[in-house]
Amino acid sequence: MPPKKRPDADRLPISQRIDSRMENPGRRRMNPTNWEIKGELFMNCSCEVVCPCGISLGQHPPTYGYCQTWFAMQIDEGNFEGESLDGLNVALLIDIPGRMAEGNWKVAAYVDESASGKAYNGILQILTGAAGGNTGVFNFLVSEILGAEREKVIIERDGRRRRIIVGRKIQGEIEMIPGKDPETPVSMQNTQYWMGPTIYPAVGLKSKVRDYGRVWDFEGKSGDIIPIHWAGPGRI
């Protein structure tokens, strides 16, 4: 049987593709609007433990000079221009050629298949920086959108462990690093990291990415777990 064609509405229309604007910095436009997200973000990347990028605010080079990573975001509470984002899961594939702060990020987004049309488009505006606020920095860091689509994004939080499954495209599990008190994981507090001031370093237990020509394995590599509270048009 021929592969099932994904509905056109599940991908950004060509006329709205953000990468066409990002390729020319002079044409970038940010349209700040009202939105808010509370929840948790966790990720696994190609760096050795502990990733230097967050604590250095992207100024320190990644372990191997480049960053390959997936992000998982579970929205506990949120809204975009009055449309509820409560309970939605989102994943990102991110390919960065050098220091995080130098930009040229290539990004693919996977948005919860249960999201309404407005919620779907709102999340894409938030995560590309177009909506301003805490994630407005993405407007300057992201140079290309590889793709944006609806998917079944499964996220599980189990004690010190976090898991994500996006079909066969992203399958990851990370675990916080235990501290002297085994009930209290290691953490970095009061950082200036734009994602959130508290970072829980983690280690990849199993972690594979297979999409957009990327085949990555981050088992044993660095991870972060970050409580988030973001909003627009201004930063919190």
Image: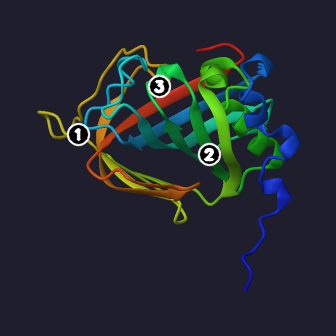
The residue at which mark 2 appears reads as: 108
The residue at which mark 3 appears reads as: 100
Spatial CA span between label 3 and label 2:
16 Å
Which of the pair 29/164 is nearer the observer? Answer: 29
Asked whether the viewer can see residue 159, the reply is no
| Above or below: residue 182 compared with residue 135 | below
Q: Amino acid at mark 3?
A: Met
What's the residue at 73%, 50% (across, down)? Answer: 115
Q: Amino acid at mark 1?
A: Ile
Give the quadrant of residue 17: top right
The tag earlier along the polypeptide, 3 or 1, is 3
Q: Amino acid at mark 2?
A: Ala
Position in image of residue 234 (x %, y %): 67, 13
The residue at which mark 1 appears reads as: 177
Position in image of residue 137 (x %, y %): 61, 20
Position in image of residue 117 (x %, y %): 82, 48
Side (left or right) of 153 relative to 68 = right
